Amino acid sequence: MVLTRRAILKSSAAVPLAAPFIGSAMAAAPIKVGSLVDLSGPLGTTGQPMLDALKIAVEAHNKAGGLLGRQIDLINYDTQSSIQLYSQYAQALALKDRVDVVLGGITSASREAIRPVFDRYKVLYFYNTFYEGGVCDRDIFCTGTTPAQTVQKLVSYATKTWGKKVYIIAADYNYGHITAKWMTKYTQDDGGTVMATEFFPLDVTNFNATISKIQSEKPDLILSALVGSNHTAFYRQWGAAGMSGKIPIASTTFGIVNEMATLQAKESNGIITAFGYYQELQTPASVAFVDAIHKQFGAGVPYIGEPAACTYEAFNLWAEAVKKSGTVTRMPVIKALDSGLSFDGPTGKVTIDPATQHCIRNVYLAKAVDKKWDVFKTFPNQTPSDTASVCNLIKHPNIDKQFVIDVKTKA
Amino acid sequence: MALLGLILFNIINGIAVLVLISIGLAVIYGMMRIINLAHGEFLMLGAYATVLSTNAGVNLWVSILIVSPIVVGLFGLLVERCIIRFLYGRLIDTMLATWGLSLFMIGGITTLFGTTVEGVSAPLGAFNIGPYHASLYSVFSIAVAAAMLGGVWSVLRFTKFGLIVRATMQNPPMAAALGVAPNRIYMLTFALGAALTGLAGGVLAPVAGVAPGMGAAYIAKAFITVIGGGAAIVTGSGLASALFGTIDQIVTFQTTPVIGQVALLIAAIIMIRILPQGITGRFFRRSL
């Protein structure tokens, strides 16, 4: 599809003209909210609760009379764990459906596929999954956690509790490599040493050699950034070798592809993770959020983790900004969001950091106990300091790129 | 010393895993010349049979040793009757058909059971080699792998059925002239290969991440092993497993899993270059 300069001028001119009309009309056209997440394929179990959370957020607003007196239409596409469909549906949302805001994307690859599309067509976009950090773009708000918020807490707790000798195992692609660097940095910051770092291609299924190596190196703890169902076999073989509980494991990824449901309790007990949200969190807002989803979609909904909670909060932050600016037009809404807007959601208080357009939010540490997460530590109001070290949108509002943060580790 | 023992045990276990994943393919591809690209999904089906029947209350050992081979064997029978029997002698067409079958199986299992199921954990616990722990379940996998090799060899070598199978694979018209129905022998051999694969899937289930797409992680290694083994399927697969398993485990232990996989593939490339007919194309030519 070719978009001419004339068409862009027309569409952007139409908004200010239409705004006063909408304000006065009784039966105004609905506001359109787009969603792009994987509901099928390998990432389907992550995407389903994200869409469910967005649905209950939209419905709550519609029941209360909508936004600016207009009802909200949710338009969602199932991207089927395919990057190609992300690009395709992003075009559809921007050009065919002409949505006012988009929430979605799960992997960093999917985000980087659709971010340029929404940049080009000036559509406000919220990305709500934890990721490696560094995105710096006026048109996107990243509401999930980044390594400075989670990995730092996890590593510092683990090295303080268990010891200073660390063995890192990670998936062999950009996420695993970047996360392993962060793990190394934070371990060294805490005075620990990394004995070895091993990367595993996603199709590795036999971990016995590594398990032997770990036994012979005798680390105090293992940091894991293993990804995907093949890698679940590590925890299986670790348990089969009688190592469960012998050397403790902390992980930045455990639980995101439903490992907790796949493994037996004795294989997962004691593993520690850090995320921005756990569905076991017992605050009133969290309990109400989980109950609302289970009531509407049944208890069979996959685990409601950080991406679902952040999606819910992202929508509410956007809605607050729309109310504050009195319009759904992109720039005024961005300005309202950047005024340090905050929202009390299921994860606690969430505030937008205008310099990075990431979120200042609570981070939790939790331990696996009998296939549930026991949240045992809260770190309130953590800032995305990693992204902040490279990105300042207040000074440089026209940047739109993802910085690769140079993680300084000792050789 | 103890570490050496542990590494040795890992090597034997690595060899056993290769034997498990390739012996069914050795029958289907090595003997019958059907490029079964759904081999990984046969393994997956075997793993699912074990996991689902164990979760439904069946004893784990019964699930692994009886339910998995029977389920996949029967499925193989169905596949042979509906698809494969029209494609004998059409190597490339079998590839296309079984690739379609593999996609269908992944889609079907995902639709029926979703992307995750609750797995079973390995029974038996661990034993000590000096200060190190190793899994007793691995001993069981090694035993099953050895029994599968021995079993297939004995059937082919000592039974009348084995003799007929070998004769039919070598020269179907001649076998038919002597009163054998090649169609039925093909059907039974394919089902046998599928059942062996199902058994392997069952054995792997407690130590693998059981998911619809898990077959993809095994299929390349299975084909490399069978091709590396050559014409004598039992001896060949056993020798190729021993060679590749040893290389993979030693290199992985010495360096990283990435280099371990690279080393395995390089070894395979060099071997195919030197021995285009596989190991048994030159050595042990008269074995089975």
Image: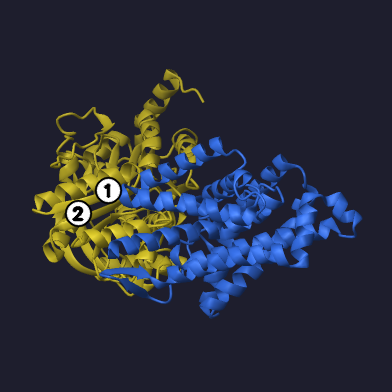
Q: Are marks 2 and 1 in contact (CB under 8 Å)?
A: yes
Can residue A282 be seen from the camera position used here?
yes
Can residue A107 be seen from the camera position used here?
no
Q: Which residue extends farthest left?
A: A191
Q: From the viewer's perspective, is residue A287 above or below residue A159? A: below
**Residue toward you, B71 or A279:** B71
- Check residue A143 in the rendering and tell me which mark sits there, or answer none: 1
- Residue B275 place in picture, x, y as percent: 57, 39
| Chain letter for the part of the structure drawn in blue | B
Ranked by sequence position, the earlier of labels 2 and 1 is 1
Mark 2 secondary-structure assignment: strand
**Residue toward you, A209 or B55:** A209
Q: From the viewer's perspective, is residue A16 above or below residue B256? A: above
Q: Residue at x 41, y 72 (%)?
A: B136
Report which quarter residue A333 is drawn in. Answer: top left
B184 lies left or right of A123: right
- Residue A3 place in picture, x, y as percent: 46, 23
The tint of chain A in the picture is yellow
Report which quarter residue A374 is drawn in. Answer: bottom left
Q: Amino acid at mark 2?
A: Arg
Residue that carries the numbered disc 2 in the rendered image = A361
Do the residues at discs 2 and 1 belong to one chain?
yes
* Cα distance between the residues tagged 2 and 1: 9 Å
Mark 1 secondary-structure assignment: loop
Q: Residue at x 42, y 63 (%)?
A: A302
**Residue toward you, A1 or A99:** A1
- Residue A231 place in picture, x, y as percent: 39, 56
Q: Amino acid at mark 1?
A: Thr
